[in-house]
Amino acid sequence: MATNFRIAASRNGETLHLKLMGDFDGISAHELLDTLKKRVVHASRIFLDTNNLKDIYPFGLNVFYTNLHTLKDRSVELIFTGENASKFEMFKNMSS
């Protein structure tokens, strides 16, 4: 369990910025999903900064993408940025 996982959030109009920090595992994935559900109101784009993630576990990515359907009723674009963005995008493409 990644007890060191944190999310810093800021909003600029309809754009939400989430800075992900620490290790990303299954518990972290649920925490991110909960944060998205709470903060997606009035957001059309969400930038997820992955620069400060250390270990990214495939299980965490699987949990995230498996449960992402909970946001399907919201019209929002998720944009991964930072040095670890490709890990999220690659897993997204594999799970589609």
Image: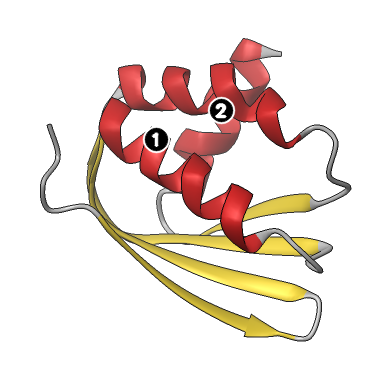
- Secondary structure under the numbered disc 1 in the rendered image: helix
The C terminus lies in quadrant: top right
Q: In the drawing, what numbered circle is on residue 29?
A: 1
Q: Name the one closer to the observer, 74 or 50.
A: 74
In the depicted structure, whether residue 66 falls above or below residue 37: above
Q: Name the one closer to the observer, 36 or 81.
A: 36
Earlier residue among tags 2 and 1: 1
Q: Position of residue 3 (x, y in %)?
A: 11, 46
Which residue of the protein is positioned furthest toward the top in this rendering? 95
Check disc 2 and give the amino acid type: Met
Residue found at x 44% / y 46%? 32
Q: Position of residue 17 (x, y in %)?
A: 58, 72
Check disc 1 and give the amino acid type: Ala
Residue found at x 59% / y 35%? 89
Q: Name the one closer to the observer, 41 or 19.
A: 41
Residue found at x 80% / y 32%? 72
Q: In the drawing, what numbered circle is on residue 90?
A: 2
Q: Residues within 10 Å of mark 1 (few under 14, many from 20)?
A: many
Alpha carbons under labels 2 and 1: distance apart:
16 Å
